[in-house]
Image (cartoon, rainbow, N blue to C red):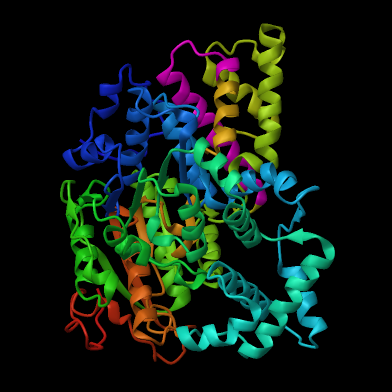
Amino acid sequence: MTAATHSTLFPQVPETPDAVLDGLDPEQREVALALHGPVCVLAGAGTGKTRAITHRIAYGVRAGILQPATVLAVTFTNRAAGEMRGRLRQLGATGVQARTFHSAALRQLQYFWPKAVGGELPRLLERKVQLVSEAAARCQLRLDRTELRDVTSEIEWAKVTQTVPADYPAAVAKTRRDAPRDPAELSQIYSTYEQLKRDRSVIDFEDVLLLTVGILQDRGDIADHVRGQYQHFVVDEYQDVSPLQQRLLDLWVGDRENLCVVGDASQTIYSFTGATPDHLLNFRTRHPGATVVKLVRDYRSTPQVVHLANGLLSQARGKAADHRLELVSQRDKGPEPVYTEYGDEPTEAESTARRIRDLIAAGVPAGEIAVLYRVNSQSEVYEQALADAGVPYQLRGAERFFERAEVREAGTALRGAARAGRNDSLLDGAEDLASQVRAVLSTKGWTTRPPAGSGSVRDRWESLAALVRLAEDFETAKPGATLTDLVRELDERAAAQHAPTVQGVTLASLHSAKGLEWDAVFLVGLTEGMMPIAYAKTDEQVEEERRLMYVGITRARVHLSLSWALSRSPGGRASRRPTRFLNGLRPGSTGSGARGGVGGG
């Protein structure tokens, strides 16, 4: 049995409420049946947490215990919310709200603003960088692009920790935060930025949460309205909530106890944004009668990958480490992790690209391989190496699948062909659904063989190829399905942001890889100064870097490669050391705390 599947096939909707529970392991089943009172699910990486909570919601809805419209499930990314909506739809639980904190708050703010404040809600500022730049200029401060990004992030941190401009310097001192500018200067920029927003009647994403909190605190009638609408709450990735999000959640829930939270303190990697695992770790203190379920059966990774992940965490220190979960792999044995030392970065990238090409030749799909690094600037050398090796790739963090121009054009073409039916000469001779889709998309640039090289032409082809594969899977799952059925499926997926898989090697930062998984993962650039990053000075910051590496390791299902280069460029001085986090874990290295000697593999 596997608790998590990466198949793109379309499962049949379970016929009965009890059928929703089929295939859950005992702990997941316990989660699904715990429909009342506070529930805390401590879920390790790869243990099927999304499966457990979506089946919990679906079982409650299908059994008539939960009314769909009264359930609000919140998470942190549009992709995670989209995946949740997609799974709930496949389980026959439509009508449940699955949203990010921001999107749920924005809907409420738009609805209640005229009643609470009057007039129209101020315009939402999509990107605050421009206004922060203007605020800095008004303070006679010049910021380069990197400083501008860092100052913008710092303002976001201040807002989600509910720190006003005047209190910012004191907050930095108290938290020993490494501010990107002099705190007094930053406080001035922050204050000016807030004034510019007021002058122009605009709000930013953090204001959405702050204003919603303000309205719910000040207007009991509106708070009662929201609490009347939502009776049951589910919070995914609870270790990532900020103080502001927790305040909003408290106001939504009120004095009721129908709250289910899911998280893993060992995957807290966003504290720089204000996220804290304290709410997860203190949940039982706040809710003494809470049902607590631990998910430790790892269905994702082989025993070899899990052994390394557990070993890494066994060296961790601090509060989150005291609550770590010891994972138990449910998979057959796989290959040992591979440790490789290189002389320089280009050699590391070229060798990684060759090994990826070998994996693809051995039958591992390109879309099931990822190269993960600590900072985005590391991607360029890997983009070049993969392009030179003729390996398709995609950068994580590109625009959403259904918003890509070629996907929108393809949808329009498929819709037109579905309306025309047999009157469309393009479909002559195309008997089954998949061949009809291939015929239509061939007019948009799809070909049976991918174009050579990388870049926008390749990206476009990969998007169309993903639609072709989706049609093939759809037809396999639903024989006799028509183009009209497929167009309806695409519309529902677009609404849920439930994207198909694009077949290319993923290049991603460790932070953006959270929540994803691949058959083969290459963790690259694992040197001191990069992992942990040079600016991680305090014990807490170093422990967060360890957790970040843990997240990277636990993305791998079968193949895991860890590598580092002793110098940046060919012929450079070999002054770098492999990360201390692998001391005592990789062959040829010594104990956990010491900075062991160099060991290759």
Q: Residue furthest top?
A: 422
x 61%, y 58%: residue: 214
Nearest to the observer: residue 271 or residue 395: 271
The stretch of residues the image draws in magenta is: 456-485
**Residue 462 found in image quarter:** top right
**Residue 11 found in image quarter:** top left
Left or right for 62, reference 429: left
Q: Residue 37, image x and y in percent?
A: 30, 43
Nearest to the observer: residue 356 or residue 85: 85
Q: Residue 68, image x and y in percent?
A: 45, 29
Quick check: is 574 in the magenta stretch? Answer: no
Q: Is residue 559 above or below residue 222?
A: below
Q: Is residue 497 above or below residue 174?
A: above
Q: Is residue 338 above or below residue 124?
A: below
For residue 248, say whether it is visible.
yes
Q: Residue 165, image x and y in percent?
A: 65, 79
Which quadrant would the C terminus be assigned to in this image?
Answer: bottom left
Nearest to the observer: residue 513 or residue 556: 513
Which quadrant would the N terminus be assigned to in this image?
Answer: top left
The dominant secondary structure in magenta is helix
Q: Residue 553, image x and y in percent?
A: 31, 62
x 26%, y 88%: residue: 595
x 33%, y 39%: residue: 51
Left or right for 556, reference 173: left
Quick check: is 469 in the magenta stretch? Answer: yes
x 41%, y 72%: residue: 348
For residue 144, say whether it is visible.
no
Left or right for 360, reference 23: right
Q: Is residue 254 above or below residue 2?
A: below
Left or right for 359, reference 479: left
